[in-house]
Image: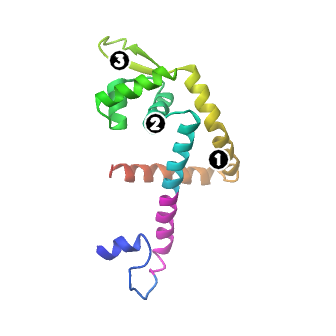
Amino acid sequence: MEGRAFALHGEEPGSTHAPRAAEEPRERIFSRLRDLSRTFDRLTASLAARLDLNLNDFRALEILILHQSMPAGQLAARLRLTTGAITGVIDRLEQSRHVARGYDQDDRRKIVVQPTRKAVKDHGKAFDPVRVDLEAFLAGYSDEELRAIQGFLEKTNQALGRHT
């Protein structure tokens, strides 16, 4: 098992043999996934900076834009933050006019948070150039290839999610 950990990062120290041919494509995929993770980290930081938000606030805003509204406790759970920490996130986003607080229609004790039109507009403006670049290169793939890519990404996300 110890040697396998090295194989994910390259050859074992002191090894004089190359990885088996069957493993090479897998190793290249692992390497590209690590590269992609670092790129996403940099992209997220860049987009957050464009909106003058810290990373937690930006991540919260993205979740809210995707889901349109969410109880504060559920948002805290998604971000793995305490209820006290999520209050700070929501306070900052509300102060920057990116979210509004409201009450759950079924349980008025619950606070629901939703993105403002400003938030959706600002996020779109920051993300649109990225979307244009992604659309341009995805246009070169057939529907069948896109379905295969989508399946790979979904299964990868599920597999990695089991370790978080």
Which residue in the protein does label 2 denote?
59
Highlighted range, magenta: 19-35
* Kind of residue sitting beneath label 1: Leu
* Dot label at residue 111: 3
Mark 1 — residue?
134
Asked whether residue 127 is drawn in magenta, I would say no
Q: Badge 2 local density, few (<14 within 10 Å), some, or many (20+)?
A: some
Where, by quadrant of the figure, is residue 73 drawn?
top left
> In the image, what residue occupies the spot 43% across and 70% down?
9
30 to 81, vertically: above or below: below
In the rendered image, the quadrant that contains the N terminus is bottom left
Res 104 quadrant in image: top left
Query: Between disc 2 and disc 1, whose residue precedes?
Result: 2
Label 2 residue SS: helix
- The answer to which of marks 3 and 1 sits earlier in the sequence is 3
Mark 3 is on which residue type?
Answer: Ile
Q: Of the residues tagged 2 and 1, which is closer to the observer?
A: 2
Q: Which of marks 3 and 1 is in front?
A: 3
